[in-house]
Image (spheres, rainbow, N blue to C red):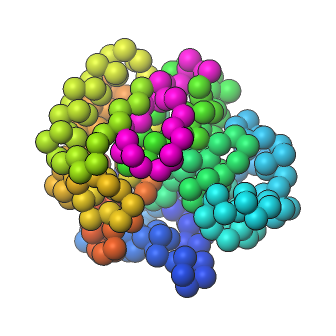
Amino acid sequence: MLKIAFHQEYIYELPEGHRFPMIKYELLPQQLLLEGTIQESQFFNPGKLSDDDILLTHTSEYYHKLETISLDAKEIRKIGFPLRKSLVERGKIISNGTYKCALFALENKIAMNIAGGTHHSFADRGEGFCIFNDIAIASNLLLVQNIVQKILIVDLDVHQGNGTANIFENDPRVFTYSMHGEKNYPTKKEKSDLDINLPDKTEDKLYLQTLYNTLPSLIDKVKPDIIFYLSGVDILESDKLGRLSVSILGCKQRDEYVLNQAKINAIPIVCSMGGGYSPDIKQIIEAHSNTFRAAMNMFY
């Protein structure tokens, strides 16, 4: 059975002007259930991370500021959300979701988190709507327990995974691969193990061919025990923050290809949803739903 991390606390209540980026976490599970792609029994509540789990990745100073809601105005501005205790607790649940998904994937080939992909969070600070770095936390937990020895992070969000790249810059056990918009946020890029910078207005053909030319050889080289896949849908032409021009079909083909590469190589894969900011919420939900549909069709 495909296990999917989700809890009601994923739905974070923001002031009216900030609500749009978060509404997909409410609508996506509804859509998947309504159309029959998944069943209610496939959802699981991951619970919260412990302090020790978080401190494997994030600094004690940063974590203390989050716990005491004492970030300064500049630090809060970098995150982009009003800082509340409920936002911090939500981050703990989502990050634990990605970790628990990894454990499920190691047993059942694949697992998925309705949220996650918070790749702009550094060890000592949050940025770009990201409090904790869920994939980094999950990776460090697997490594410290010797559950895996080698990890491949495939980050196909339109924005570079700068926090993830920085966290693992000097860790040869984790290979970070980010394919993103060259001129998009963040202005200052970090150094992933492999960065592919795409020009503005990149369409399906170039996008997919670049992926096809890269991922198989990368898997052969890295030989990962697990893949974390950040499947952001902000690559869409309709995305107001994306700058690329990939179609809904192209985004679907991307997901199918990544999942198939994991399947044919018998590598467990964990999917975190990442970004999506198209003005029409229906396009965001459709693109994210395609990731789950592809997983069900391919693995079940």
Q: Residue, x 41% and y 49% (percent of image)?
A: 184
Can residue 138 be seen here? The reply is no
Residue at point 27%, 65% (across, down)? 238
- For the residue pair 108 and 251, the one nearer the viewer reads as 251
| Residue lying furthest top | 221
Q: Residue furthest bottom?
A: 16
Task: Look at the magenta stretch and give its main secondary structure.
Answer: loop
- Tell me how many marks there are: 0
Percent x, y for residue 130? 59, 55
Q: Is residue 120 visible?
A: yes
Q: Is residue 247 above or below residue 208?
A: below
Position of residue 190 in the picture relative to residue 274 (left or right): right
Residue 188 within the magenta-colored segment of the rendering: yes
Q: Tell me where residue 182 sits by quadrant.
A: top left
Please tell me whether residue 2 is drawn above or below residue 144 in the rendered image.
below
Residue 132: x percent and y percent? 65, 50
Query: Residue 176 in the image: x percent, y percent?
Result: 48, 30
Q: Residue at x 32, y 55 (%)?
A: 243
- The location of residue 141, given as percent across then percent down, is 65, 34
Q: Is residue 8 left or right of residue 156?
A: right
Q: Is residue 71 magenta?
A: no
The magenta region covers 170-193
| Residue at (79, 60) in percent of width and height | 71
Q: Nearer the viewer, residue 284 or 271?
A: 284
Q: Is residue 265 above or below residue 204?
A: above
Depth check, front residue: 220 or 145: 220
Q: Is residue 14 left or right of residue 291?
A: right
